[in-house]
Image (cartoon, rainbow, N blue to C red):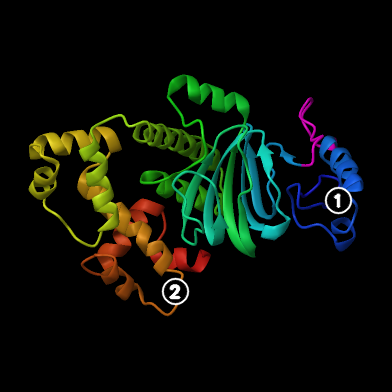
Amino acid sequence: MAHPHGMRLGCPRMTGPGCSLLFRRAGSAAMHYLATILFASDSEPGREMTAANRLRHGHFFGDRARTRRIGGLTLAEMRPTVPEHEVESHTHDDAHFLLLLEGRYLSSAQGMPAVCAEPALLLNPPGTTHRDCFRGVNGRFFTLSVPDAVWRRAMAERRLPQHALRMSGFGLTHAMRLCRELRHWDSASPLVIETGLERLFDDAAAERARDTGDGPAWLDRARERLREDCLHTPRLAELAREAGVHPVHFARTFRRRYHCSPGDYLRRCRLERSLDLLRMRERSLADIAASCGFSDQAHFSHAFRRAFGCSPGQYRIDA
């Protein structure tokens, strides 16, 4: 972690910018003692870290490239510092959103593959215990840590997930915008972040509704079809016929459940597909546009900018 008094500490059981070789080779008792002292010095009252496998607000196994705190929220863009075999099971005191930007990530969250190597957004509610980690130390991730009071207020206003899960749909897009806001901070950024967090809460509530099976089964099947075959553009009548409902009913039910039209959802799936391709420097933007089902590069660039707040070229530079 980056300590306010200039000390730096990181170890397999706690967060922060990488530890020195001396600290890494220290005995477990010494490490626990150092963790207690150093974490207590910048803790809130009653929030000291007294167990080496418990991570308090805003702390992760990584080096912070940039960070901001506003109204109790903590945003950070980080790089992992602890290899997979050194990460033990640990508990996060507070809720956080984690946006995987680069690298191979192992997670037990619902909806995650065994190894995730594409942009993904995870929500870990308060008290999440897991052994999530990067394979190796080559990667980047963005985190938005939510204090307990903010989480409880959000829970009182909407039904949020009670377990770790991968968020799909618009959540990834909204998180990418917040990550970009952190990189290009200005005087309006605090309001952008607070507004963006509310949108993430709404996205998370929608995830819970889908997870608990609210709504007809045909709707989930239709959504999965659009995601898995996003390069094909079905007609509304085709989707409704497969679902066994009237096209008007299909469109209204889809929008009510997913807060967008089937066409908007299909375009969002194509844009998510493009994020991975943009990391391949040898691929031209025109080639990526065609590979993701856009009519031309201009159409792709316009849709990308509307969704993520920057051009595909700028995203490629940042990535």
In the structure shown, which secondary structural element does the residue marked by tag 2 occupy?
loop
Estimate the x, y position of residue 266 in percent, counting from the top left.
Answer: 25, 52
Q: How busy is the neighbourhood of tag 2: few (under 14 within 10 Å), some, or many (20 plus)?
A: few
Q: Write down the quadrant of residue 128 in the picture.
A: top right
Q: How busy is the neighbourhood of tag 1: few (under 14 within 10 Å), some, or many (20 plus)?
A: few
Q: Residue at x 87, y 48 (%)?
A: 28
Segment tinted magenta in the rendering = 41-52
Identify which amino acid the numbered label 1 is placed on: Met
In this figure, which residue is indicated by the disc labeled 1? 7
Identify which amino acid the numbered label 2 is placed on: Met
In this figure, which residue is indicated by the disc labeled 2? 280
Q: Can you see residue 58?
A: no
**Could you tell me what secondary structure mostly forms the magenta stretch?**
loop
Q: Can you see residue 142?
A: yes
Residue 165 in the image: above or below residue 234? above
In the structure shown, which secondary structural element does the residue marked by tag 1 occupy?
loop
In the drawing, does residue 298 fall left or right of residue 45? left
In the foreground, 142 or 116: 116
Q: Write down the quadrant of residue 271 in the picture.
A: bottom left
Q: Residue pushed farthest bottom? A: 282
Q: Which mark is residue 129?
A: none
Q: Which residue is drawn at 45% across and 38% down?
A: 200
Residue 104 in the image: above or below residue 111? below
Q: Residue at x 68, y 37 (%)?
A: 57
Q: Does the magenta stretch include residue 95?
A: no
In the drawing, does residue 43 fall left or right of residue 118? right
Q: Which of marks 2 and 1 is in front?
A: 2
Q: Which residue is drawn at 42% across and 80% down?
A: 282
Estimate the x, y position of residue 288 in percent, counting from the top left.
Answer: 33, 71
Estimate the x, y position of residue 117 in percent, counting from the top left.
Answer: 49, 62
**Label 2 vs 1, first from the N-terminus:** 1
